[in-house]
Every structure is written in C-alpha cells, then in structure tokens.
C-alpha cells in the first residue's frame, strides 16, 4: 500500500527517498532512521564521505553524535561541498530521564477536558492527519503514516484531544532510531512536541512527552533518549532539562543539497 507523507513537496520527497533507502541499508548499524531521513548514526564511525553521499542521495540528511569541538569543521566542510548546514544541539538523557518522566506524570494532570490518543495499526486516516496537523502547526515534521501506525518502527505517538470540540491540541512521540548492534542502540529519538498556541501554558507537551518516554520503555525497553534542539530555543531546552535531557558534548548537523531541497529547513 502506498505510504502517506507530510509537509512541503521537497520534504516529502526526502522522506520518500529515505524510506526506500532504509529498506536497503537497515541491516547496517552505520545508519539510523525514525521516519524523516536515513541518518549517519554516528559521525565518528561513519565518516564524512558517507555523510556527503547520504545528502546527495536523499537531498537532506543529518549526522548524529558530532563532538562539539568538531562542529566548525563539519559546517565548513558542508558549505565547501556546496551544501547548506543546519546545526542542532544534541540533547541527551543523562541517566535520570525515566524517573523524571514518572515524577512528571505523578505530579501533573492534563485535566478533564482532554483525552489522550495513541496512534497505532488501527488508527484512522483522520487521526493521522490530526497528529500531523498539530505537529506541523508547531513547525515539526511528522514521519510517514507507516511509522505513525507502528508498521515500520517501534514507536509511541500521542496526541491530546479536546473533548468538547474533538480538536487535537498537542502531540509528542518517542521512536526507535538506531540499529540493535549500534553502540547507540539503547537510545531512542524523542520529541515532535507541539501544542496549539491557545493551549500553551498548561504543560500539555511536557506531560505527553513524559508519557511517551514511559510508554516506550514499558513496551520496548528504551530508557535513554536523544533529540535535537536549536541553541537559541530556550523554551525547548528548559523542557528537556526537566527530563534530565541536557546539551553540551554533542551536536548534529543536517546537510541540505540546494539543488534538490529548497525549503529553509526540514523541521523546527
């Protein structure tokens, strides 16, 4: 069955290419995928030339686990190769994330006006569209429908729905990313937090994010998490810190080929 992709046409094309590429390289620990693009799983072991090839093949691609003291080298090399470079601070679990997530769930409540829905194999097209809609409203790119349903990756996709209107107002996710034999295999991707402006201030994204972490651990055993946050995004950094997810040692870069990819960026 044909998969469904979200976002602008060039972003959809990257995701479509990535899914096809992952079907070929999924047995290789050097590559990672949680639905957006096939990434270089570990810059130190994967190497810069492989990173460049992944960008050329897909149009855009990230490299993970880049030591911050190599950031200037990576950015300069990407620009010299004719690509655009988009840096994210790599925010990583520091060992206490699961306990912090459970404390958040014990200490905060969404309120009686919201229901939490988890996407899965039987989710309707409408629910997939609702998740994607609230994600993209916050500048966040959702993965294709096959990932949202759990057909191609282990994951937890949650959304909060207003009981009165039926409108989805917030979302969060946690997803398998690395190969089981990768040295990063115990880390899952976490993020896709987005809340409609009029619903902000109630800690909805924090609660959904904590629930996604706990659920992925209970279902699949992942206890460490990573996400990418721009250095200037103080709000997201503060939210991550509440879950003992901190920046400092690592960054990631998304390389973009302007000949294939015209959007300013892949995701927020």
Image: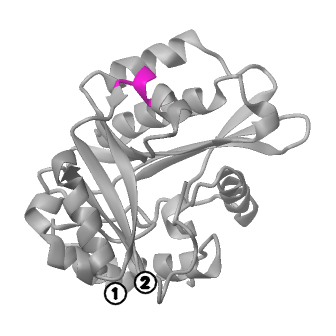
Q: Position of residue 167 (x, y in %)?
A: 83, 45
From the viewer's perspective, is 124 left or right of 35?
Answer: right
The residue depicted at 19 percent of the width and 62 percent of the height is 73
Dot 2: few (<14), some (14–19), or many (≥20) neighbours within 10 Å? some
Query: Magenta region: which residues?
Result: 240-244
Q: Name the residue nearer the viewer: 211 or 133.
A: 133
In the rendered view of the protein, which quadrant contains the C terminus?
bottom right
Extreme residue in the left direction: 45
Residue 241 inside the magenta-drawn segment: yes
From the viewer's perspective, is 217 left or right of 260?
Answer: left
The residue depicted at 35 percent of the width and 82 percent of the height is 82
**Which residue position is annotated with label 2?**
17
Whether residues under marks 2 and 1 lie with C-beta atoms below 8 angstroms apart, the answer is yes
Circle 2 sits in a helix, a strand or a loop, which is it?
helix
In this view, 18 is above or below 228? below
The answer to whether any part of residue 180 appears in the image is: yes
In the rendered view of the protein, which quadrant contains the N terminus?
bottom right
**Which residue position is annotated with label 1?**
57
Residue 177, by quadrant, is: bottom left
């Amino acid at each position: 069955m044909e998969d469904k992709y979200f976002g602008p046409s060039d972003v959809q094309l990257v995701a479509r290419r990535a899914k096809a590429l992952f079907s070929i390289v999924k047995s290789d620990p050097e590559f990672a995928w949680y639905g957006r693009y096939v990434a270089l799983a570990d810059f130190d072991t994967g190497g810069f030339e492989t990173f460049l090839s992944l960008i050329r093949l897909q149009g855009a691609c990230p490299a993970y686990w880049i030591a911050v003291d190599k950031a200037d080298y990576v950015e300069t090399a990407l620009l010299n190769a004719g690509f655009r470079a988009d840096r994210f601070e790599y925010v990583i679990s520091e060992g206490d994330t699961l306990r912090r997530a459970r404390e958040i769930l014990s200490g905060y409540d969404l309120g009686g006006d919201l229901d939490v829905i988890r996407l899965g194999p039987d989710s309707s097209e409408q629910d997939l569209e609702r998740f994607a809609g609230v994600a993209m409203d916050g500048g966040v790119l959702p993965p294709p429908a096959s990932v949202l349903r759990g057909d191609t990756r282990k994951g937890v996709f949650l959304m909060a729905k207003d009981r009165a209107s039926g409108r989805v107002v917030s979302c969060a996710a946690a997803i398998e990313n690395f190969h089981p034999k990768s040295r990063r295999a115990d880390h899952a991707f976490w993020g896709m937090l987005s809340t409609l402006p009029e619903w902000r201030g109630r800690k909805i994204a924090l609660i959904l994010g904590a629930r996604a972490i706990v659920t992925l651990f209970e279902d699949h055993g992942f206890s460490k998490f990573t996400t990418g946050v721009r250095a200037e995004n103080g709000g997201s950094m503060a939210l991550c810190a509440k879950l003992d997810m901190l920046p400092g040692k690592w960054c990631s870069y998304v390389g973009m080929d302007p000949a294939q990819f015209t959007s300013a960026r892949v995701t927020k």
